[in-house]
Image (tube, rainbow, N blue to C red):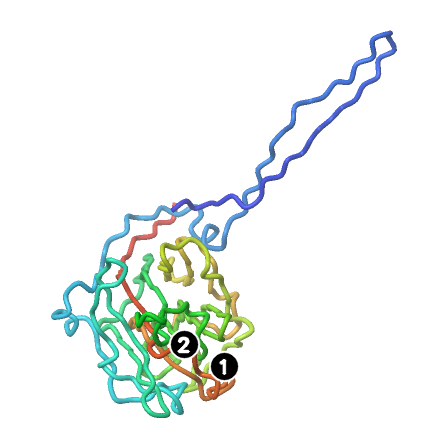
Amino acid sequence: MKNRFLVTVVFIALTATTFLSCNNNKQLDTPEEEVIVVVESEYDKTIEGKELGTWTEVFRDDFTDSSSSGMHWIFENNRADYNSTQTADYRASQVNYMDWDNREVIALSAIRSGDRFQAGHIKSKIKYGPEQNEEIRFKASLKLLARDGENSDGSPRFVNFDQTYGLWPAFWTVDEDGWPTKGEIDIMEGYSYGNSEKFTSNIFYGTTVGVSSLSHDNTVYEYNLEGDSTDGWHTIEMRWMNDSGTRSIHIFVNDQHVKTYNKETDPNLELQNFTPHNIIFNLNVGHDGEIFNNNLIDGFTKAYYFIDWVEVSKRDIKNQ
């Protein structure tokens, strides 16, 4: 990826007009001149002047072999979601390997079961984080879709994520022991509202177990997931950097930087206290609070959260 990107092109027409005192007056025009203005992203500024090593793969799962799933992932089972105790229960039966769009994927699903919903949740068995003078990257290819009954010919009727209401998929990292004292990084959280949708990144930290000391006004960042994609697939990425003890976190969507979290994000954010994290993918439904009106959850008979691949890689950072 290029470290700089073009954001504005300004054309300035410079015209100099001179009237001569002779009989043949002439107007002299200078050629049109193109001025290019380049603005650095926060990530560009962070890596400016540094020598970066080559990315080295630490972990990758292409979800081609279901027999190896137990080696890498914990399939959450028989518990309610922490934020949606009234509506959603995680079941291992809602995590399945399958083929979709000519890809081998793992699919987290959500279905209604009585007055509640059963949903999928997986967590990596290994924790990952940057060492001193190292950058670590978490990257995944994702797609959201839902089935809503059948067409008139009896074939499944599929609808886009934004046509449903009450779905809450996420791609995030966390050390759940003593939450949030060791940090949480929400790389992607999606919310479906029936003909609309929202995607955000977020971050949590606090010194007291069970209480985040960060302001949502400072940490929640909404981004657009409608950009460059192939058949609804998107590449979501988080880079976590430890540059001689200075930590920062960077969110990328479809290979474009969208958000940086650092010591300036919130006065209570202490990234040096973040420990290595597990990776989590989950498809939640509803909320105990105000995110959704649980009485309006609808628009799907079965929701899908497809993950084509996930990769963790790292590289060295050298200050020049």
Q: Left or right of 222: which side holds 172?
A: left
Which mark sits nearer the N-terminus, 2 or 1? 2
Q: Left or right of 159: which side holds 45?
A: right
The percent position of residue 298, horizontal first and vertical second, equals 43, 81
Between 267 and 142, which is closer to the camera in this rendering?
142
The answer to whether one can see residue 81 in this image is: yes
Mark 2, secondary structure of its residue: strand
Mark 1 neighbour class, 10 Å CA radius: few under 14, some 14 to 19, many 20 or more = few
Q: Left or right of 244: which side holds 65?
A: left
Mark 2 neighbour class, 10 Å CA radius: few under 14, some 14 to 19, many 20 or more = some
Tag of residue 168 = 2
The three-letter code of the residue at mark 1 reads: Ile
The three-letter code of the residue at mark 2 reads: Trp
The percent position of residue 58, horizontal first and vertical second, equals 22, 60
Between 111 and 305, which is closer to the camera in this rendering?
111
Q: Residue at x 49, y 80 (%)?
A: 213
The percent position of residue 242, horizontal first and vertical second, equals 36, 61
User: In the picture shown, does residue 142 fall above or below 182?
Assistant: above
Give the quarter of the image for residue 30.
top right
C-alpha gap between disc 2 and disc 1: 10 Å
User: In the picture shown, does residue 112 fall above or below 274?
Assistant: below
The percent position of residue 252, horizontal first and vertical second, equals 41, 58
Mark 1 = which residue? Answer: 291
Between 301 and 154, which is closer to the camera in this rendering?
154
